[in-house]
Every structure is written in structure tokens, then in C-alpha cells.
Image (tube, helix red, strand yellow):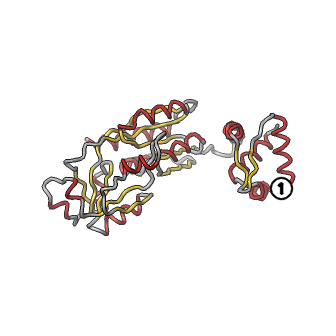
């Protein structure tokens, strides 16, 4: 086994196809296949299952690839360390829920960056994708959102996967709506007031060890007659800004964001469900200075929005 073989395995795993990987690596497919078979023979494991749909990692292959990525990143870092003519680039990456107080914190965090080279990755997604992103080491930090009633399921899973978790916010959802929404005429908003309107909801809820149907029934109940499912914040705000008949359950939004979009947020008297936002990262990962800066901004934004 050598470094080149590790690079080959990582590229094939990334592409999911021997032919695609060979194009990127500029090596003939038969030669690439031979190198992988030699590595498998040396290690006494099967790294890939060869299927009609392409190359699929085995459980052993997933473990090997995780270690190989780490080793290759360390080699790159070592090379950069001794390239005196190249200034070392800082990296930051986080997977988060679609939450305005977190995106606001990220924007403020970006304003604090020094003039040195830096590369930031900010991905909004659901909890299962955030966990996978951190475990695959594509993202160093993650923030999960879940109802407090599922606290045990999430903590058991995070501990089993070797992830550190720290709660950064606990809150009740509020309603966000158009400035001309009929809900604003109500002194107090109840569930019944929502019935004739259109709910906007994120359409990919997730809870570990529970079937999707059960999670959807809890997070997207059937008693809502009119609903639009979205998967990112841009379209949700487009809908809210244009259509006065829409509303959405959200974590509290910064006032500056509400003013900019001309939206309003109100509590619902009937809503007692509690949610949590939880920071996660791998046990073997040491938080960087950039990580700590971002976490500080998230905490600052949370305090200003939720208190």
C-alpha cells in the first residue's frame, strides 16, 4: 500500500465509478482497477463492492477511506507547511439547520476575518445530512435541530457515532408571515386561526431510529389542509414576501432580517412544543480559532433573538 493507492481509492469512492475516477486521475481503467485489487490483497479486505450501478464502499472500505482522507489531508498540510512562498490558507466548514439567527451569525462572523487566505463552507440541510457531513469529515462542525421529545434518540446516536454534542439554544417556534397577513389582525393567534392559510414547511424531517412516516406525522401533521414543502430558505422567504396567505413555523428571526424582508413574527398561544439546536463535532477534532469565533457569534445571535 502506498499514498498513490490511497488517492486512487478516495477518488473512486468520491466518483462512485471506476471510469469517472480514471478520467480525473488520468489513468487507464484497467490499471486503476489493478491498483485497487493490489491494495485489497495487501490489506486482506474488500474496499469496494463492484455492482451494476458502479463502485460501492464496503463497511471496511468506508473505514479505510475515512482514514485515507485524514492521511491525505495531513500530507497536504505538511507540504503547505514547508512551502515558504505560499501563505497557509485557513479553512472553516459547518452544516446547519435552515435558521436565520444562525445565518445572521455566519454573516457577522465573515466580517471578522483577517486579510489572510481563508476558505469557508456553509451548508444548510437537515439533521441526518449534517451528521453525515461531519462523520465523513467534509465538514468540521454541525448544528442539529430537533424537538426536545427526541432528545434521547439523538444523544444515543451521537454517542454511538463518537460525536461531541453541546446544546446552544432551546426555544419554541414562532410564526413568521407577510406584513399584510390576516393573522396580524388577531390579538392572540391560535391553531384555529391558521386553518384557512397556507403553511410553508421544510419537507425533510429526520429522527434517528424512528420511521420517516412517524416523524413526518409528528413534524408535518395531516390536519394542515394547505401546505407547501420547501428545502432551502431562499424560496421560503420568496413565498412569505409575496403571498400574504402564507405563514411558517421558525426559530426566532433577528429583527434586522425581518425589517429587510418586511416580514413579521408572532408567537402562537397554543404552541408548547420545545426545540433544541445542538452543536456537534468529532471527538478527535480540536476546535480552531475560526470555529470558536463562529460559535461565539451564534451564541450572541441566539441571545439577541431569543431573550
Residue in front for this viewpoint, 84 or 48: 48
- Name which residue lies at 70% across and 54% down: 15
Is 94 displayed left or right of 26 in the figure?
A: left
Residue at 39% over, 42% down: 146
Quickly name the residue at label 1: 29
Q: Residues within 10 Å of mark 1 (few under 14, many from 20)?
A: some
Q: Does the image show residue 198?
A: yes
Residue 272, horizontal then vertical, whole percent: 25, 42
Q: Residue furthest left?
A: 187
Residue 85 versus residue 287 in the image, above or below: below
As helix, strand or loop, the secondary structure at mark 1 comes to helix
Question: For the view shown, which residue lies furthest in the bottom direction?
Answer: 242
> In this rendering, would 141 be left or right of 34?
left
Determine whether, in the image, residue 261 is placed left or right of residue 39: left
Residue 270's spot in the image, x, y percent?
21, 47
Placement of the N terminus among the 4 image quadrants: top right
As drawn, is 100 to the left or to the right of 25?
A: left
Q: Tell me, yes or no, if residue 70 can be seen here.
A: no
Q: Residue at x 46, y 48 (%)?
A: 212
> Which image quadrant is residue 87 in?
top right
Towards the viewer: 231 or 44: 44
Q: Which quadrant does the C terminus fall into?
A: top left
Amino acid at each position: 500500500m502506498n499514498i498513490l493507492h490511497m488517492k486512487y481509492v478516495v477518488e473512486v469512492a468520491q466518483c462512485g465509478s471506476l471510469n469517472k475516477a480514471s478520467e480525473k486521475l488520468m489513468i487507464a481503467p484497467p490499471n486503476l482497477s489493478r491498483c485497487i485489487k493490489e491494495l485489497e490483497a495487501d490489506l486482506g479486505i474488500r474496499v469496494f463492492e463492484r455492482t451494476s450501478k458502479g463502485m460501492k464502499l464496503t463497511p471496511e472500505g468506508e473505514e479505510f477511506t475515512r482514514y485515507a482522507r485524514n492521511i491525505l489531508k495531513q500530507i497536504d498540510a505538511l507540504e503547505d507547511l514547508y512551502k515558504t512562498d505560499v501563505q497557509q490558507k485557513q479553512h472553516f466548514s459547518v452544516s446547519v439547520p435552515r435558521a436565520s439567527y444562525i445565518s445572521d451569525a455566519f454573516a457577522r462572523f465573515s466580517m471578522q476575518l483577517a486579510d489572510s487566505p481563508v476558505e469557508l463552507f456553509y451548508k444548510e440541510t437537515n439533521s441526518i445530512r449534517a451528521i453525515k457531513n461531519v462523520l465523513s469529515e467534509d465538514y468540521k462542525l454541525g448544528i442539529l435541530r430537533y424537538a426536545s421529545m427526541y432528545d434521547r434518540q439523538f444523544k444515543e446516536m451521537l454517542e454511538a457515532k463518537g460525536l461531541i454534542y453541546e446544546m446552544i439554544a432551546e426555544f419554541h417556534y414562532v410564526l413568521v408571515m407577510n406584513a399584510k397577513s390576516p393573522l396580524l389582525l388577531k390579538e392572540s393567534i391560535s391553531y384555529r386561526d391558521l386553518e384557512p392559510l397556507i403553511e410553508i414547511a421544510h419537507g425533510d424531517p429526520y429522527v434517528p431510529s424512528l420511521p420517516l412516516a412517524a416523524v413526518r406525522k409528528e413534524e408535518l401533521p395531516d390536519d394542515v389542509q394547505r401546505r407547501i414543502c420547501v428545502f432551502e430558505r431562499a424560496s421560503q422567504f420568496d413565498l412569505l414576501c409575496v403571498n400574504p396567505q402564507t405563514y411558517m413555523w421558525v426559530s426566532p428571526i433577528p429583527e434586522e432580517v425581518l425589517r429587510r424582508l418586511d416580514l413579521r413574527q408572532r408567537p402562537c398561544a397554543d404552541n408548547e412544543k420545545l426545540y433544541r439546536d445542538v452543536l456537534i463535532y468529532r471527538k478527535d477534532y480540536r476546535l480552531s480559532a475560526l470555529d470558536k469565533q463562529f460559535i461565539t457569534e451564534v451564541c450572541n445571535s441566539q441571545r439577541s433573538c431569543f431573550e
